[in-house]
Image (cartoon, rainbow, N blue to C red):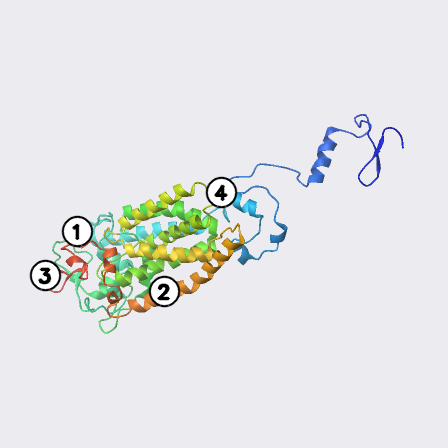
Amino acid sequence: MSSGTDVDEVFNPYSDEPNNNKPGYSDASLVHNAAGFSGVKDYRDPEPGEGAPLVKDINGAGASPWQRLLGGGKYPLEQRIDQKRRGIGRQRYPFVTWVLSVVMVAVFIYELVINSQQQGTPVSFHPVVNPMLGPSSSALINVGARFPPCMKDVTTVPISTQFPCMNDTANPPDRICTFESLCGFGGIPATETPNQWWRFITPIFLHAGFVHILLNLLAQLTAGAQVEKEMGSAGFFLLYFAAGIFGNILGGNFSLVGVPSVGASGAIFGTVGVAWIDLLAHWKIVYQPGRRLVFLVIELVLGVAVGFIPYVDNFAHLGGLLMGLMFGMMLYPIISQTPRHKIIVWVLRIAAIPLAIVLFVVLIRNFYKSDPYAACSWCRYLSCIPTSANNRCKGTGLSYTTTTTSTTT
């Protein structure tokens, strides 16, 4: 070997003489060779929402879609934690949230048109003012609000009851219409039992007024959109409707039967439930968890306070929150840093499935009983402030007309 020759780790000789003067040598060739060796050719900063350009976890490369849905190891633990802290979820755009928001706006316009056709103005000011700046209660019932007398046989509100017509603006009302015309959707013949079960679903897309829909759109397009990006559209879709429907079922059981209820608040509170699951499961991962806890508590208190406003039902909020906790536990991708944490998460996931089913079945059966209130006599006060106008929350809450006299029961 010459003086300018060395050997590498596998005993192959190479020269230690400078390469600068050799044919074909250039700085560009060094860069090319280095890029080829490292496997990174064109490095760039990640776009917002794209995630750090880290390598995939070899052990998680074959993870099934179901494993990835539940937070399985498609990427290394460190990368998943990093993406979590940066707010990067499963997808960049919340498509379901956008579609639902467009539908909500379209349906609200339809509500205003109906009220305008009946009363001459989109917003009801007579016989009473809608504090949400929207249609009258009769119009809301007609387009699909949750209203138990249209859904089942209510002893205190028989099908023979007559109501103020939608176009009646007098106070007290001087025009009365049949139960059939109020419930709409083809009406309910006097010889049949009301069975408009879809009123558990339709209120999700209805809103009591401009104030109501603006607040819900704000929450849905911010907090709801973030939950969808983290969960994925499929999981978010299931969560949204499970929470919204269950909220209406709970309200149908314990709210005053004569008070119509509308709004996507139950579904939106389902996303709040997911936010609680996220915080509690990732307490050691998320940035400033104590601060997030304070904001969630404030959000919960404000939501419950809003639930006492006319046409808005606290039971929809509380029911949506409860089902959001259940479905969040079932479907939200949770990062486990220890085997113990992973075991706890899976035990809770499995337990949440039968619990959610039992809650749905028990409350649906209770709703169709003659007296759902018997299951919880004090529950009505969670969505009703006792006043003389509502008979201290012990009547139906309904103002209706049987002859020519307006009556509140």
Query: Could you tell me which quadrant the C terminus lies in?
Result: bottom left
How far apart, in angstroms, are the residues tagged by discs 3 and 1? 16 Å
Quarter residue 329 falls in: bottom left
User: Label 4, on which residue?
Assistant: 85
User: Label 3, on which residue?
Assistant: 405
Tag 3: Cα neighbours inside 10 Å, few (<14), some, or many (≥20)? few
Nearer to the camera, 296 or 200? 296
How far apart, in angstroms, are the residues tagged by discs 4 and 3? 62 Å
- Are the residues tagged 4 and 1 within 8 Å (C-beta)? no
> Which amino acid type corresponds to the residue marked 1 in the rendered image?
Val
Earlier sequence position, callout 4 versus callout 3: 4
Tag 2: Cα neighbours inside 10 Å, few (<14), some, or many (≥20)? some
Tag 1: Cα neighbours inside 10 Å, few (<14), some, or many (≥20)? few
Q: Which mark is residue 299?
A: none
Residue 50 in picture, x, y percent from top left: 54, 43
Query: Could you tell me which quadrant the N terminus lies in?
Result: top right
